[in-house]
């Protein structure tokens, strides 16, 4: 099912972080996730741990089954993984802009400069790409839209705030704390 | 306009259906082969681009070698196809 990688450690690490984020959000154990993709017993849980620790990355069919078990689209799982990796060396900037987390930055960016119509178009595209499970809360700061949070069916999007994103005020749905 | 999530070649939502391993294996092989031939890239040329042998490509497309996530990303990049677009094709096939 898996093979050890030694070519793209960045990808393995970023996939591992992403997988763990999604699993913990669902509050399921490594055992439970493994059994949902047909890997039962201790070997199944070990396989999940190997993925999460960045030791191994899955074959594509396993990757899709993991996404299915995590109740996210395979595209969302791949996009999140690749977005993390765009901070490394895997893809260049022209490709990075296609992925969702930078898109969130762009939404905030356009919002900050008050391009509301463009912001709305972007949001519609974003929602379509993720099966319309996305809602966005924002308030205005003076005359400018100011994003508060972006939610999906499974909770707050797994933002990994970069320097650019930190200037926006992201809040969590559960506690309302600003971060 | 910026394309979101799936690159700039597809605006359709990513399929989110029920998948099984056997069907996926078949879809992956067919889509990878189809994407290569659509671009008029030979197995040998693709192999050169990613540092493989032609036999490795043939084995992958023929189902004698499972497609690792890294293989998939390498091939997408070598074919200059957005990986999310390519994944979307696999899931829709």
Image (cartoon, rainbow, N blue to C red):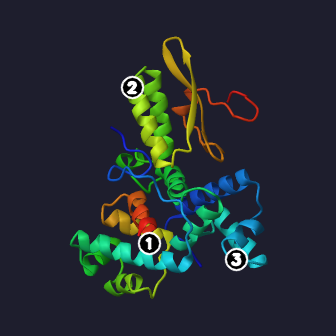
| Whole-number angstrom distance, CA of label 3 to CA of label 2 | 47 Å
Residue at the spot 37% in from the left edge and 77% down from the top edge: B30
Residue for badge 2: A117
Compared across the picture, whether A125 is left or right of A168 comes to left
Residue for badge 3: A39
Quadrant occupied by the C terminus of chain A: top right
Residue for badge 1: B71
Along the line of sight, the residue nearer the viewer: B73 or B63: B63
Image location of residue B43, percent across then percent down: 28, 80
Quadrant occupied by the N terminus of chain A: bottom right
Q: Quadrant of residue B49?
A: bottom left
Along the line of sight, the residue nearer the viewer: B64 or A153: A153
Chain letter for mark 3, please: A
Same chain for the residues under marks 3 and 1 in the image? no
The crowd level at tag 3 (other Cα within 10 Å; few <14, some 14-19, many 20+) is some
Q: Is residue B19 visible?
A: yes
| Whole-number angstrom distance, CA of label 1 to CA of label 2 | 40 Å
Q: Is residue A53 visible?
A: no
Image location of residue A116, percent across then percent down: 42, 23
Q: Are marks 1 and 2 in contact (CB under 8 Å)?
A: no
Q: Are marks 3 and 2 in contact (CB under 8 Å)?
A: no
Compared across the picture, whether B39 is left or right of A107 comes to left
Image location of residue A121, percent across then percent down: 40, 33
Mark 3 or mark 2: whose residue is earlier in sequence: 3
Classify A36 as above or below A160.
below
Compared across the picture, whether A71 is left or right of B6 comes to right
Same chain for the residues under marks 1 and 2 in the image? no
Image location of residue B17, percent across then percent down: 54, 63
Badge 1 marks a residue whose secondary structure is helix
């Amino acid at each position: 099912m898996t093979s050890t990688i030694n070519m793209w450690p960045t990808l393995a690490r970023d996939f591992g972080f992403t997988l763990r984020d999604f699993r913990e959000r669902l509050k399921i154990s490594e055992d439970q996730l493994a059994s949902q993709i047909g890997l039962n017993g201790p070997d199944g849980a070990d396989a999940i741990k190997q993925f999460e620790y960045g030791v191994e990355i899955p074959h594509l069919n396993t990757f899709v089954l993991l996404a299915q078990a995590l109740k996210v689209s395979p595209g969302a799982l791949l996009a999140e993984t690749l977005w993390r990796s765009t901070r490394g060396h895997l893809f260049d900037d022209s490709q990075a802009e296609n992925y969702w987390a930078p898109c969130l930055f762009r939404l905030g960016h356009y919002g900050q400069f008050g391009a509301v119509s463009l912001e709305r178009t972007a949001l519609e595209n974003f929602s379509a790409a993720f099966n319309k499970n996305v809602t966005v809360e924002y308030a205005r700061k003076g005359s400018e839209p100011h994003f508060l949070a972006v939610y999906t069916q499974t909770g707050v999007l797994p933002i990994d705030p970069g320097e650019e994103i930190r200037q926006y005020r992201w809040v969590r749905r559960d506690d309302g704390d600003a971060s | 306009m910026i394309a979101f999530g799936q690159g700039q070649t597809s605006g359709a939502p990513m399929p989110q259906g029920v998948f099984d391993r056997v069907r996926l294996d078949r879809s992956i092989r067919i889509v990878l082969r189809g994407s290569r031939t659509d671009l008029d890239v030979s197995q040998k040329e693709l192999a050169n681009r990613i540092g493989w042998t032609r036999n490795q490509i043939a084995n992958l497309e023929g189902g004698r070698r499972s497609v690792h996530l890294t293989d998939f990303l390498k091939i997408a990049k070598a074919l200059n196809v957005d990986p999310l677009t390519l994944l979307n094709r696999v899931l829709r096939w």
